[in-house]
Amino acid sequence: MRAVLISGGVAMLVALLGTPLFIRFLVRRQYGQFIRQDGPTAHFTKRGTPTMGGVVIIGATLLGWAAALLLTGTKPSVSEILVLFLMTGLGLVGFLDDFIKISRQRSLGLKARWKIVGQGLVGVAFAVAALQFPNDLFRTPASTKISFIRDTGIDLAFAGATIGLILFVIWANFLITAWSNAVNLTDGLDGLATGVSLIVFGAYVVICVWQFNQSCQILGSAGPRCYETRDPLALAVVAAAITGACFGFLWWNASPAKIFMGDTGSLALGGALAGLSILTRTEILAAVVGGLFVLEVLSDVIQIGFFKMTGRRVFKMAPLHHHFELGGWGEVTIVIRFWIIAGLFVALGVGIFYGEWVAG
């Protein structure tokens, strides 16, 4: 448990103290945000604000995690390395996207096909590796079964190991793409995506610690409702590091933002959330815990689908936070209320998680 506290605390301090240094560096290099012309006009004043703050979030997470291992003398586990690989790999794709936007002074970065290729390469590598590396109890970081709160009876390997691997890679990449795009869509107002991520990853600290205390790998004391997660405490350390990094970064990202996380941060956080959901066997539960992200995606899907069918719009602008912004709500008001909604979703998700164990 000391490792969880250390990783979160160190990551928070690194992000809190390191972000202003990174801001100065970006200002000197004139790496500022390019604002889309079709967005809310109030956002034009944000043009030139330093972006790519996701570099700080990723760096603080890695340093917090490394500090926890060093100070507790713990060896890194495969599960935590996989999540950090997914987070860093998608962050690199986002960094390239951000850098192209800045260097070419336009709102479009990497071409869509190259972005998909980059995400796909990282996602496939993660998915394939997640089914390897069995421990002494023959448990791999992930399984081919679809999971809700724990693995369900739906096994993607129903037709054999090879088919199972292929279907799992497709399923895992769907989740990775969905979550990275969900966080990316939410990152439209000062502090919105950072604050929601902080709440969601904080919930995963609780979930992972609970799974560790009720792990099936605790021989002699594992109960009938134990969890099959291979490295729950290690995943708690990673989740705590991400939570701490978001906490420190939010100090500078809150309205009026001194820096934006950019695609570097949103893709990295989305990837980390997807990785945690897969390795903790809570793939579907994650849609409840991260319900605010899901709402933002749904608003975009509904807007596009309804417009193509009828030529009319459901919302004044999508994703959802822009609808309220054009409706006259203040930016801070929207962000705080969305944080509250995110907290309610997290409470519901954690409640379902705990309720399933109690009822069982």
Image (cartoon, rainbow, N blue to C red):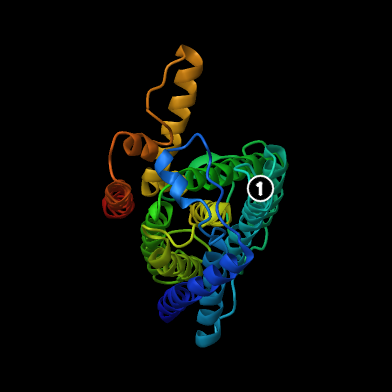
Residue 93 at what x, y percent from top left? 66, 53
Residue 135 is left or right of residue 1, and the answer is right
Residue 263 at what x, y percent from top left? 57, 51
Whether residue 216 appears in this view of the structure is yes
Residue 195 at what x, y percent from top left? 37, 57
User: In front here: 55 or 252?
Assistant: 252
- The kind of residue on which mark 1 rests is Gln
Image-quadrant location for residue 166: top right
Residue 311 is left or right of residue 144, and the answer is left
Image-quadrant location for residue 8: bottom left
Residue at 49 percent across and 52 percent down: it is 277
Residue at 42 percent across and 72 percent down: it is 220
User: In front here: 210 or 35?
Assistant: 35
User: In front here: 235 or 60?
Assistant: 60
Residue 89 at what x, y percent from top left? 65, 58
Q: Is residue 322 above or below residue 85?
A: above
Image quadrant in which the N terminus is located: bottom left
> What residue is pinned by disc 1?
119
User: In front here: 226 or 302?
Assistant: 302
